[in-house]
Image (cartoon, rainbow, N blue to C red):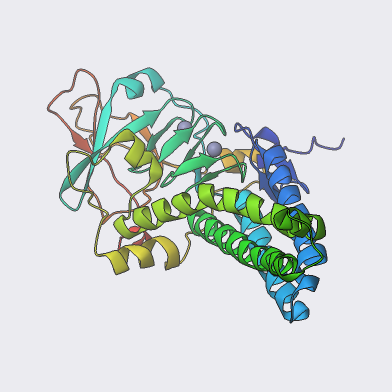
Amino acid sequence: MASQPSLKGWQTWGGRHVFLCDGRVMVGPDWGVTCFAVALTTVLSVAFWIFVCPTLAGAPLVTSVGMLLYALTLTLLVATATADPGILPRAPYVDDAESLANASAERFVRGVTMPLKWCSTCRIWRPPRASHCTECNVCVERFDHHCPWTGQCVGLRNYRYFFGFVLSVCSLCAYTLVVSALSFLHALAAALTDATSGGDRVGVALDERPVPAALSIATALILLCVCPLLCYHCSLTCRNATTSEEIKGTFADRANPFDQSCPANCRHVLCRPLPPSRLHLRSAAAEELGGPMILRNDGGGGEGGGGVELPMAAADEGPPPLRTATLPGSEGKRRPAREQSSPDDVPV
Ligand SMILES: [Zn+2]
Ligand SMILES: [Zn+2]
């Protein structure tokens, strides 16, 4: 008798993501908005190539640059939307979940104490900078924010794609705005010098070049929204901070231990090798569920109750840390837990 085929990791997924191609592609719950963003970018770009570029000298070159920026924008959008942002796999079960929910744990990063939070949904201790996204229903390392336009969380593993996407949108809009405005201004200049034109010279230019005028206004409005976003993320990157930390005021009353010099922060956030994904979506479900490290306390001596398992996710960043956990009723008797960390986690 043939055995029942086991379910794959993506088929028992606890988050709200959508999977395509047998788990090879994962998109966020807001994938419809991402499709709208792709459609909007495509419509505006095609209108630009057809109605604006041919009106200027050097049309093939102008069109080629526009197509290059469009391809770059779409590539980075898709990369952000489909990359694993740094999801921490859930622990399968925890015997002592109630005690763990009331326990406290902390970690020291460059001399600063970072409290760890227990996620009762994912059943893991979240490392510093990780957060649970309520849209996706998963914990994400170095969580920045949930981006509705890419339909996905922005975190440790896709932040650089998101940053590149915002930068490329700004470049595409600025380019489209400049070229469209030039095209319209040429028509306006021609109307102003044309003695046969009536009094409304702007109206004449609008009749002749309606698409360049409309694209100028549309791209200017988009730039007004996206430019401040780009400046904000430049500032975050220079300080090695995240949107989530800024909103929560995590480092409002203390120094950010992850903040090194500006060049080091930029290298660390945008250029360091990406850690591998912790997900095994196409493996058997049990393997996926066993993804996080489940570490047993060393405190077998009985202080605070030995033998309690602490499901812990590996750390995002920070030097080899000291992690301690305190269970209710064992205040002041902290027991160190073993931990694994990789050199990639250490900030530059
Ligand atoms: Zn969680
Ligand atoms: Zn999310």
**Relative to residue 196, is residue 108 depicted above or below?**
above
Q: Quadrant of the C terminus?
A: bottom left
Instruction: Identify the residue at the far left of this view.
Output: 332
Residue at left offset 36%, top offset 53%: 236
User: Quick check: 299 left or right of 50?
Assistant: left
Q: Position of residue 140 (x, y in %)?
A: 47, 42
Residue pictured at 36% horizontal, 64% vertical: 266
The answer to which of 22 and 266 lies nearer the viewer is 266
Residue 6 as seen in the image, left or right of residue 174: right
Towards the viewer: 29 or 70: 70
Residue at horizontal 82 percent and vertical 65 percent from the top: 196
Which is more toward the observer, 312 or 36? Answer: 36
Q: Position of residue 35 (x, y in %)?
A: 73, 45
Residue 337 appears in the rendering:
yes
- Compared across the picture, whether 82 is left or right of 211 comes to left
**Does the rendering let one see residue 341?**
no
Residue 201: percent from left, percent from top: 72, 58
Q: Quadrant of the N terminus?
A: top right
Q: Residue at x 36, y 48 (%)?
A: 315
Q: Position of residue 81 (x, y in %)?
A: 63, 49
